[in-house]
Every structure is written in C-alpha cells, then in structure tokens.
Image (cartoon, rainbow, N blue to C red):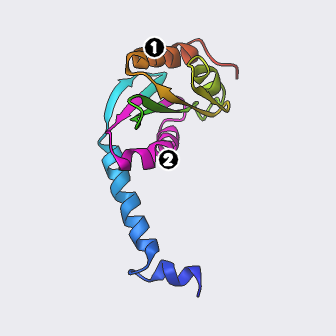
Amino acid sequence: SSPFDAINDENSVFFTLERAYKADMQKAANATVIHDCDTAKVILLDDAPWARRVSGVLGNDLANQAPTKAHGVITSNTKGSFTVSVRAPLSNKQGAVDVCSNFATGGGRAGAAGINELPESQIPEFINSLVSYYEKGALS
C-alpha cells in the first residue's frame, strides 16, 4: 500500500532488486582496468548481463571516486563489438561527446557520452583519444 512498506519488507521486490544491484556492483568492482593514468581510467567489463546492467552506473561511480579523471567503461555487446560509456571529469564536465563523436556510432552530451558499436580493433584508438583530449586540457 506504500513504498515504505516495500522498503521495510525483506521479502519485497525492493530487496530482491537491491541485492541484485549490490551483487552486480561487486562484480564491477573486480573488473579489469585496461588503462589508468592521471588523466583517464578505462574499465573492461565481462561479456555478461550484469555488466550491461551496470555500465552507466559504474561510470558515474568512477567519476565520483576520481573527479579529476575522465572515465570509460567498455562492455561487450550482442553485435560482436563493444559499447562504451564515457564520463568527463566532474571537475570539468566537457568533452565526452567530442571524444565519442570521433567514432562512427558515438554521440551524447558534454559530460556523458558513449559509443554504441566500437570494434575491438579500435579500443586502443579510443583510449588514446580519451587521454589525449584531456591531457590537452578540455575547455574549462
């Protein structure tokens, strides 16, 4: 009858979803870091449903943990390529769309953008683009 009833009932769907979210985020915490420098951090998630559920939330979480860095979360998709979620540094919410728009299926907003289908062969190019954009100093 009330949302608070669901929150207080350990048998409710709220607790089921909360447990699943925490389990997904714990897996994400153990994901492979494929690049980490003063400018940017890039994480590669497993090819699994949990990874696709948390890629955007993880990008936000990483940005909050290191607000002066840009962050990329790369996740395998069902098309044989990778989906990329990018967060600009919280200290300078510019450029995510500029980086992602360099790739055929990229776009988004200044602070958060993505690439829908990045071929595996372009992952190094993406990382170089992300790092070099922020090393040069995006507009403040």
Is residue 29 depicted above or below 8 in this figure? above
In front of the other: 107 or 7: 107
Is residue 30 depicted above or below 72 in this figure? below
In front of the other: 130 or 55: 55
Left-right relation of 109 to 25: right
Of label 1 and label 2, which has the lower sequence position? 2
Q: In the image, is residue 80 part of the stretch drawn in magenta?
A: no
Residue shown at 59%/84% (left/top)? 2
Give the quadrant of residue 137. top right
- Circle 2 is placed at which residue position? 57
Give the percent coordinates (x, y) of residue 71: 49, 31
Mark identifier at residue 8: none
10 Å neighbourhood of mark 2: few (<14), some, or many (≥20)? few
Give the percent coordinates (x, y) of residue 53: 44, 49
Q: Which kind of residue does numbered mark 1 sit on? A: Glu
In front of the other: 120 or 113: 120
Q: Which kind of residue does numbered mark 2 sit on? A: Val
Residue shown at 57%/20% (left/top)? 104
Give the percent coordinates (x, y) of residue 47: 32, 39
Q: Which residues are magenta?
A: 42-71
Give the percent coordinates (x, y) of residue 116: 52, 31
Mark identifier at residue 125: 1
**Residue that lies at the very extreme toward the bottom in this rendered image:** 1
Q: In the image, is residue 57 part of the stretch drawn in magenta?
A: yes
Residue shown at 42%/45% (left/top)? 52
10 Å neighbourhood of mark 1: few (<14), some, or many (≥20)? few
Which part of the image, by quadrant, shows the N terminus? Answer: bottom right
Give the quadrant of residue 103. top right
In front of the other: 30 or 56: 56
Residue shown at 52%/12% (left/top)? 132
Q: Whole-Å distance between the Cαs marked 1 and 2?
A: 24 Å
Give the quadrant of residue 115. top right
